[in-house]
Amino acid sequence: MIQKKLWLSVALASLLLTSCAKQPTAASGGAAIVYPSDVTRPKLSQYELNVISEKIYQNETSGNPKNLMFWSKNETFPSIGIGHFIWYPQGQPKVFDETFPAMIDYYMAHNVEIPTWLQYARKTGAPWRDRATFEGSRGDREFQQLETLLLNTKALQTEFFFDRLTASIPEIVKHVAPQYRDHIVNNYNALAETKGGWYPLIDYINFKGKGIKSTEKYNNQGWGLLQVLQNMKPVQKGPFALMEFSRSAKEILERRVRNSPPAKNERRWMNGWTNRVNGYATSIL
């Protein structure tokens, strides 16, 4: 019965979804976002949304549904869904942006029926106090409910990423130092106007963040979308914009690894990160 209700809810959500070419709104479902006149407004067709959602699903899970819910040995929180949304247990310091409670709100705003326990937990925190408890709960009814919900709402999760990107671009433009503004806006616009350009923008901001928070920097150097756009050479729309974004992203991640505390051994992630950003160099459409 639970499985059937989830499938019906997802079907209803799919009917309610419209093209992301709508007026940009915040991921939380708030008011329309005001874009500077020289910054391209995001637009995404349903076809692009579906292609990108499957690509991100493969990136994050290698096609294995078990990886939709993951808790790294090196983290104090689980990562949930195709975006590996962060969800802190109650009492854990929130060093990085916590995104899964907002995703739960997004489900509710799109009339997706979710379990009562999940509605409650969005306010109290992840229901597993540590990684051992999390792994020991994989066979529990609630764990499997959430896993099924995530598997059947990949497109909606991607729309949430897209709305997050939409909300973040004006914030990034406002945050950046004036002397770098035109360069960053130009490079963003070039990606936005290139066939397949939304995928690297959506995936990277979901993958490594905006690049604004002070806690997401080593040696005062960030590794988010802001830093990738700033590190790019000036580009125009077209295939070279994708290649240059890919090159810049790899360089920024290599800098992150060099700056990272040796005890974290972030070098072990670099091969996977490189493979991911190499995929930005050619259009997926």
Image: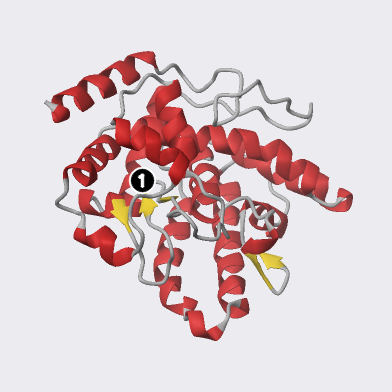
Residue at image point 58% right, 60% down: 95
Q: Quadrant of the N terminus?
A: top left
Toward the bottom, the furthest residue is 262
Q: Which residue is the site of mark 1?
A: 82
Q: Amino acid at mark 1?
A: Ile
Residue at image point 37% right, 38% down: 53
Residue at image point 46% right, 49% down: 282
Q: Quadrant of the C terminus?
A: top left
Which residue is nearer to you in this view: 56 or 188? 56
**In the structure shown, which secondary structural element does the residue marked by tag 1 occupy?**
loop
Image x and y of residue 223, in percent: 62, 62
Could one spot residue 268 in this view of the protein? yes
Residue at image point 40% right, 51% down: 84
Examine the image and state in which quarter residue 142 appears. top left
Could one spot residue 186 in this view of the protein? no
Which residue is nearer to you in this view: 244 or 86? 86
Image position of 13 (left or right of 105): left
Image position of 93 (left or right of 125): right
Image x and y of residue 117, in percent: 31, 36
Image x and y of residue 152, in percent: 25, 33
Label 1: how many Cα within 10 Å (few below 14, some 14–19, many 20+): many
Image x and y of residue 115, in percent: 28, 31
Q: Is residue 249 above or below residue 124?
A: below
> How was the colour assigned to the protein in this rendering?
secondary structure
Image position of 188 (left or right of 143): right
